[in-house]
Image (cartoon, helix red, strand yellow):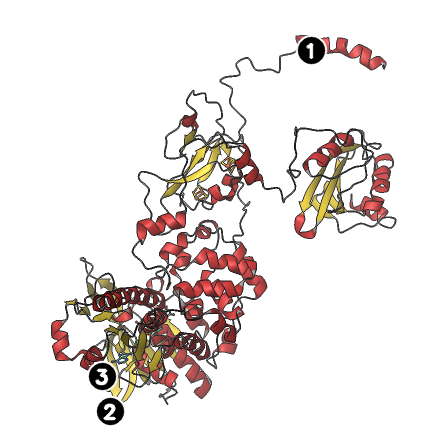
Amino acid sequence: MSLRDVLSPFTAWKHVINDPVTIKDPFSREASDRYRGFHQNDMDKCIGCGSCEEICQNAAIDMVPVEGQNAGPGDSGLRPMIDYGRCCWCALCVDVCMTGSLTMSNEYTWVDSDPDAFRFVPGVDAKSWDLEPKGYQREDERRLTGTVRAPMGETCPEDRIGNFDEIVDGFTAEQAIIEADRCVECGLCVATCPAHMDIPDYISKVRDGDYEGGLQLLYETNPFSQACGRICTHKCETTCAAMHEGDAIAIRWLKRSITDSVPRERYFDLIQKPDVPETGQSVAIIGAGPAGLTTAYDLARKGHQVVVFEALDKPGGMMRYGIPEYRLPYHVLDHEISVIESMGVEIRCNMRVGQEISMDQLKTAYDAVVLSIGLHQGRSTRVPGSEKAEAAIDLLRRITAGEEVPVPEQVAVIGGGNVAMDIARSMARLQKIKHGKVGVTVTALEELDRFLADKEEIEEALEEGCDIFPARGPQEILVDGDTVTGLRTWKVDAIFDAEGRFAPKYDEDDEMVHPAGMVVEAIGQMADISLLGAELTEQLEWNRGRIMIDADGQTSEPWLWAAGDAVSGPDVIHAVADGHRVAVSISRMLTAKREALQ
Amino acid sequence: MRELLYRLKDRYHFGTPTFQRDDLCFVTVKRSELRAILTELRDVEGFTHLTLLTAVDWIEEQQFQLTYMINNREANLTLALRVMLDREDATGDTIHDLWPTAATYQRELREMFGINFPGSPRVDEEFILEGWTDLPPYRRDFDTLAYSQQTYHDRPGRETHDPKTHMQKVLYADYPKGAK
Ligand SMILES: Cc1cc2nc3c(=O)[nH]c(=O)nc-3n(C[C@H](O)[C@H](O)[C@H](O)COP(=O)(O)OP(=O)(O)OC[C@H]3O[C@@H](n4cnc5c(N)ncnc54)[C@H](O)[C@@H]3O)c2cc1C
Ligand code: SF4
Ligand code: SF4
């Protein structure tokens, strides 16, 4: 025993005269500032993604519906309920929270004889510590999930302007896995996708490198996954939980990475027609766009005989004749459609219904008919000289068909939507090829930040040398004899009147003449319904110029359904969703008909 | 500190040092050289205090990382030496003879990570877990959630909802999901 050991009990006595370090009243003692106490949850920020529940290693959290919070875009309406009998106050839930809504107060003392009192929904069930600023918050820069999107390779403007080659490279396998890893699999996006694709499930296939399983999943909800992986309007990404504190997951590119990673011949092994008996019933589909072909795919897989009548040379609809090749290469579309054909779908091209064959003939020869004719007539501004203007979709179709189109050195485009950007950028390419330089002017009524076109489209058009003039209203297409010489515009003061009706007001003093050898109108499309004929047009019920359909896509005629742009729209994925809906409805009718005959 | 590492690097194998701060540096060393480096740092360089000894489970690489954090109080410098161990073998070299406190850390690592330190006093005795028969709980293949679910009861009446399924029910119950 050392001398120190002997003396230390006595030296301790010197503390007798010091202030005690213990606390006089331990019950009203406040915890330290960053103490992890009962949770707080900001109801305005929480989106009910359930990441907190997912991470909790004590299964202390349940996601529950609560009063006053409703499911809607990007919010499940559920909120975390915490069982404090299980919580160990680790704060992992706070660290992972996708919105930063979840925090912890420094309050931890609470006595109650009812154990169920310790199960409640923070932020909903009011507590005295709800506004307590002290406690645990996630440190600002710290995130458990990656906040930055994996980079995507693109051809630079100089290299892409002289050709129609695809611009976006697609993820490498490594980039795809990094991006897939950021997904918390909450599934909020699934409600936003019009076809309700199984987004978190296929993203997890990317993460596991199981591309073939991923492809099969994609086909369960979307036979146009290759196209959508490239050109989808990707509204899902606007409701991604990751966007609250970083970049939304690149859902569209991940879909593409699955479709690009499976060798083409494997598609036919992986996506096979189910072994179902032939029903002997047949369906005619008018129009081989995504709406018609999705309907055809579903119905063929149910054992019905399906024939698709297509007016143009090749199937694909606006995906082929509208969307330019540099965004969606034709070989991708060809392959995608060949998978649909492998289900036994017969596509008869160059068969314009109303000319080659009549509605009446289809009605007689088939058990059901689907009208999926899209919108193939360009709208006109009807300003003086507009009979000399080109329609954007006509031009785009002719470019796809390989027809010779006039390529003047200067082109003016009217319109600020995606179609306007597509024609502007297509003409810019043709100009570059023919004249070595770009001369495209885009004019639109809207201010630039209100353009209907996607931001990337506008940026890329600018990069490629197109000039954009926002807030310019077309007044006249200037003509010299038979040739177009330019477009005269006025400055737009307002597009809508006080009641919100379309009634543009102009500043007539602010006039511009945009010199142009061609003026293109890209202000919208409408359906060419001449195929219906007077009698059927009369019989059908209409709703503001559109054929009226019910929730299943059926028209007022018991044999006729309608799908896609012609009745709803506005994009490929909505057309796909329509196709599924209509196929189920027709199938139901056909089954009932079969059963009635038996 | 840089100059110290510079001096030692001719005689020992060091990985690239990471300076967290000017006075806090992490560096990986070889297991066979660890005791020699620690002894020299303690006896010659004034790193008299063992601040902590802890481990990381790099399960993907099949390795355990031991971190020996030592401190020179006089100079106010902290150096953390990292040693990588084969995860399968999971055996380290005891340093309780250099710092007696290390025995406690090593006993904790034995219990929580299953890393053995042969020769360390009482290393096989229970530390804080009593009657533990499962995988060492700090190993990453230990399923904490499953353990807590087996071990602790739920309050009755608990029910959770999957956000995706809930939204489907509320927002688009009529949509025909899939071509199936
Ligand atoms: C320039 C442009 C760019 C676009 N970009 C995108 C984009 O990036 N992303 C996106 O999601 N959507 C985009 N869209 C919209 C998308 O292409 C359409 O929403 C989609 O193709 C609609 O599908 P659908 O099947 O209803 O019609 P369509 O694709 O238009 O197909 C209708 C088909 O019916 C045929 N048809 C018409 N009348 C007859 C008849 N009487 N007899 C036989 N066949 C007939 C047509 O030839 C056509 O093939 C774009 C559209 C355009 C015009
Ligand atoms: S603090 Fe930890 S144990 Fe408690 S609810 Fe959050 S994650 Fe679960
Ligand atoms: S992680 Fe955050 S945003 Fe998501 S449900 Fe939990 S508290 Fe709400």
Q: Nearer the viewer, mark 2 or mark 3?
A: 3
Residue type at mark 3: give it.
Glu
Q: Are marks 2 and 1 on the same chain?
A: yes
- Whether tag 2 and tag 3 are in contact, CB under 8 A, the answer is no
Label at residue A15: 1
Quarter holding residue A500: bottom left
Q: Residues within 10 Å of mark 1 (few under 14, many from 20)?
A: few
Instruction: Say whether disc 1 or disc 3 marks the residue closer to the N-terminus.
Output: 1
Instruction: Say whether disc 2 or disc 1 marks the residue closer to the N-terminus.
Output: 1
Instruction: Say whether disc 2 or disc 3 marks the residue closer to the N-terminus.
Output: 3
| Residue B65 visible in the shown view | yes
The residue drawn where x is 85% and y is 15% is A2
Residue sitting nearer the eye, B92 or A248: B92
Q: Residues within 10 Å of mark 2 (few under 14, many from 20)?
A: few
Residue type at mark 1: give it.
His
Residue sitting nearer the eye, A55 or A149: A55
Q: Residues within 10 Å of mark 3 (few under 14, many from 20)?
A: few
Label 2 and label 1: CA atoms lie apart by 109 Å
Say what secondary structure mark 3 lies in: helix
Label 2 and label 3: CA atoms lie apart by 13 Å
**A183 horizontally vs A361: left or right:** right
Quadrant of the image containing the C terminus of chain A: bottom left
- Residue A463 position in % (x across, y down): 46, 72
Residue that numbered label 2 is attached to:
A481
Residue that numbered label 3 is attached to:
A387
Kindly identify which chain the residue marked by label 3 belongs to.
A
Quarter holding residue A189: bottom left
